[in-house]
Amino acid sequence: MRFGYSDTCLEHDTGGRHPETPDRLRAIKRGLTRKHGVEYVESEPASIEAIEAVHDPDYVTEVEEFCASGGGNWDPDTVAVGATWDAALQSAGLAQWAAETALEGKQGRDTPFAIGRPPGHHALSDDAMGFCFFNNAAVAAQAALAEVDRVAIVDWDVHHGNGTQEIFEERSDVLYASIHEDGLYPATGEADEVGTGEGEGATCNVPLPAGTGDAGYLYAVEEVLAPAIERFDPGLLLVSAGFDAHRHDPISRMRVSTDGYGHLTIAFKEIAQRAGAPIAFVLEGGYGLDTLSEGVAMVHETFDGHTPVAPDSEPDEEVEELVADLRDRHGLGS
């Protein structure tokens, strides 16, 4: 794989007690050090025009001025310093690079993965929240629409990407599909949130019960997200890749294993192939340094030919019932 990375993203200093720290990127790079075929690319930062294509211009100005004044707590969870402005532009630029690289056809072992920070999927069109200032995946998707008619964003972070959904929920050219822990922050992403207006049907939420592991995730992907994405027929598949559903992550209750992330990678790689769409990855959450670095390394190893260990269980009945409801709700067959 090719990893988009910049030291600029390390300058976003959230303080010693904050879970979203520069050490996340350092841990990822340490975990990739001994892996075969790792290449790092530093992209240009996103332009103001690219950011304002998905964010309100007044909000963008407000973020710039907030950082220029030294930053502070935007809200209790979302922290900025002066350098956050450059880091946020760089993180969005890395996501754009990933989308552009995928569309250029540099796939296989060159599949792009943007490992920037701050993350993005909670950033609304006009507000920061959940550690996020600019919505990196949304910036990348919007830019990609200059080249393709439709983009699908799949979000496997344990938290629902309320910002990505809000930005695109009234549009039919971007499918937002999220698989997340039900009821966890920010308490959005219910099954009946399917988009509005022209975007009705282009939002697909899979709110899994707490404690769901590899088998439940893969079952939901195969039975709901795969047919939904293939029916949408995207020209690009972007994965908002958080690793906080890991069984050892400190801020979730899900039970995905490191090998489970390998199977998710295989599943979405195959979905993209069947849809005839290139695939790219954009980092979101993941707050256990070891599990985060292992998860990203597993994605890389899977593209490098590694076969992860198969799940040793079946999906729970509660997951099967949710999947049946979602297939009916989205008209995916019986």
Image: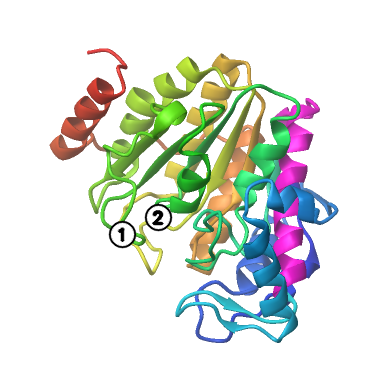
Gap in angstroms between the C-alphas marked 1 and 2: 6 Å
Q: Position of residue 44 (x, y in %)?
A: 85, 53
- Give the left or right position of residue 279, taking residue 186 as reference: right
The residue under the point 79% across, 68% down is: 7
Q: Quadrant of residue 105?
A: top right
Residue 1 in magenta? no
Q: Secondary structure at mark 2?
A: loop
What segment is highlighted magenta in the picture? 84-110
In this view, the residue in front, 79 or 241, is 79
On the question of residue 311 being in view, the answer is: no
Q: Secondary structure at mark 1?
A: loop
Decide: marks 1, 2 in contact (CB < 8 A)?
yes
Residue 96 in magenta? yes
- Give the left or right position of residue 284, taking residue 146 as reference: left
Question: Mark number for residue 21?
Answer: none
Q: How would you classify the magenta stretch by its main secondary structure?
A: helix
The residue under the point 57% across, 23% down is: 272
Above or below, 239 against 92 in this view is above
Quadrant holding the N terminus: top right
Quadrant holding the C terminus: top left
For the residue carrying disc 2, how many other residues have a C-alpha within 10 Å: few (<14), some (14-19), or many (20+)? many
In this view, the residue in front, 12 or 202, is 202
Q: Position of residue 325 (x, y in %)?
A: 20, 28
Q: How has the structure been colored for display? A: rainbow
Q: Which amino acid is tagged 2?
A: His
Residue identifier under label 1: 184
Above or below, 56 against 165 in this view is below
Q: Position of residue 208 (x, y in %)?
A: 27, 44
Residue identifier under label 2: 159
**Sequence order check, earlier mark of 1 and 2:** 2
